[in-house]
Image (cartoon, rainbow, N blue to C red):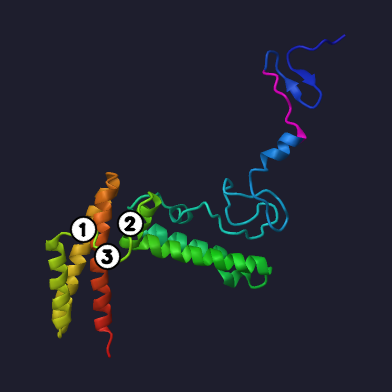
Amino acid sequence: MWRGGAGALLPGWGVLPTGGPRRRPLSCDAASQAGSNYPRCWNCGGPWGPGRDDRFFCPQCRALQAPDPTRDYFSLMDCNRSFRVDTAKLQHRYQQLQRLVHPDFFSQRSQTEKDFSEKHSTLVNDAYKTLLAPLSRGLYLLKLHGIEIPERTDYEMDRQFLMEIMEINEKLAEAESEAAMKEIESIVKAKQKEFTDNLSSAFEQGDFEEAKEILTKMRYFSNIEEKIKLKKIPL
């Protein structure tokens, strides 16, 4: 009579090598609980969640799902959570996502998916614009570290810096020629480049207080940039 041995067959398990670990089979309840940590698809009820590779569509029925509230802009745009961002890669990701979730592609789908596509598209637009510009990117990255800079705050700016801002604003107010405007633009552009480089270093070193001060200064020069744009608009 055969009594078993190497490669013994056990019901429901197949071949069990001699001396191999004797694992307990996963019960039906445990198997169902394995997917219970994921939210359910609104359409088919199948498990779906942030842990899956595809965060937009249900893997079972392919219905578009609601935006993942746990996902930040860097994750959404497939960027490292860093101040240094590859803008070409960012633009490519933006175009890729809009081809995936833009409302134009859901005109014949259910109202729920139409609503979700609007939310996704808006979120992608916001993420792209935020991460594209150094100022908004820096403010967002600082916010992810629990630090926010209130609007209209001088953040204890030194007198010398405030005097510099006043002088540039005065020059802008008095500028009447294209050459004068270009000179001011050149000054502002150079300052913003200097701030951006310093800000990148501050984030790399984890010096958030320094980053906060630089970003506040960048806001002042950003306001001047807006004034320049307005002055260029013909009355």
Amino acid beneath label 1? Glu
Nearer-the-camera pick, 134 or 87: 134
Q: Which residue is mark 1?
A: 156
Q: Residue at x 15, y 85 (%)?
A: 176
Q: Would you say residue 38 sits in the magenta stretch?
A: no
Residues in magenta?
21-28
Mark in front: 2 vs 3? 3
The disc placed on residue 219 is 3
Residue of label 2: 138
Q: Residue at x 22, y 53 (%)?
A: 198
* Residue 110 x/y as whole percent: 69, 68
Residue 43's x, y, as percent? 71, 58
State the residue in front, 122 or 150: 150
Q: Amino acid at mark 2?
A: Gly
Task: Give the x, y percent position of residue 141.
Answer: 37, 53
Counting residues from the N terminus, which is met first, the one under dot 1 or under dot 2? 2
